[in-house]
Image (cartoon, helix red, strand yellow):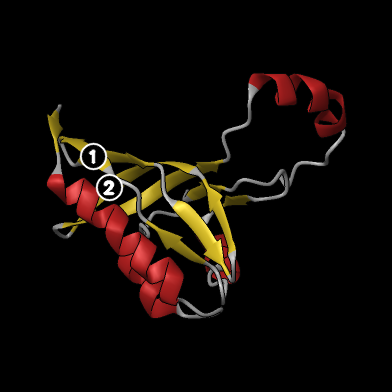
Amino acid sequence: MQESARAREALLRFYEAFTAAAPGDMETFERVFTREQDLLIIGTAAHEWVAGRETGTKQWGMEGVGIEPGDPVGWERDGVAWAADRPTFVFGDVRIPIRLLAVLLDEDGALKIANAHFSVGVPDEVAAEKAVEWSRATPAH
């Protein structure tokens, strides 16, 4: 395994695409996501579980929501890469610090996201306090 500037750059391209994309903008979707059918994106909310490329294309594009990069890092080996960052979701005056881990595949010389998991860091005390309420939430999958 070695550090990968390509993985870092691919994550930064995703942020740009996510920020610019409107619903139905398949050109940007194709630039950043794998052609593989088993694409999986896990968002920060309980219902945000996007399984499969077809579902991903239907849910792509969130006007008015952007992602500002933190300081992404990446690694790569044998055509598979992974990148991690602490970026910020931005919509209007609201800024939410998040965490992101993405797995990327080399497709025709470009790294594209096959799996991404977004999360919001929650203190353990808050998680313990809210665990019962959150366990009642209906997952999307």
Camera-nearest residue between 79 and 8: 8
Quadrant where the C terminus sits is: top right
For badge 2, the amino acid type reads: Leu
Please give the label number shown on residue 74: 1
Query: Looking at the image, which residue sits at the far front?
Result: 93
Earlier in the chain: of badge 1 and badge 2, it is 1
Residue 80: quadrant of the picture: top left
Please give the label number shown on residue 14: none
Mark 2: give few (<14), some (14-19) or many (20+) Cα within 10 Å.
many
Q: Indicate left or right for 32 with 79 as reference.
A: right
For badge 1, the amino acid type reads: Gly
* Up/down of 136 relative to 38, above or below: above
Q: Position of residue 83 (x, y in %)?
A: 30, 41
Camera-nearest residue between 95 and 113: 95
Dot 2 corresponds to which residue? 105
Residue 101: quadrant of the picture: top left
Q: Position of residue 45 (x, y in %)?
A: 68, 47
Q: Position of residue 49 (x, y in %)?
A: 63, 48
Q: Position of residue 94 (x, y in %)?
A: 60, 61
Q: Indicate left or right for 5 with 63 as reference.
A: left
Residue 74: quadrant of the picture: top left
CB under 8 Å between discs 1 and 2:
no
* Up/down of 134 relative to 24, above or below: above
Q: CA distance from mark 1 to mark 2?
A: 13 Å
Camera-nearest residue between 85 and 111: 85
Residue at image coords 41%, 42%: 86
Residue at image coords 20%, 35%: 75
Please, what secondary structure does the residue beneath circle 2 have? strand
Please, what secondary structure does the residue beneath circle 1 have? strand
Image depth: mark 1 or mark 2 in front: 1
* Up/down of 85 relative to 91, above or below: above
Residue at image coords 82%, 29%: 135
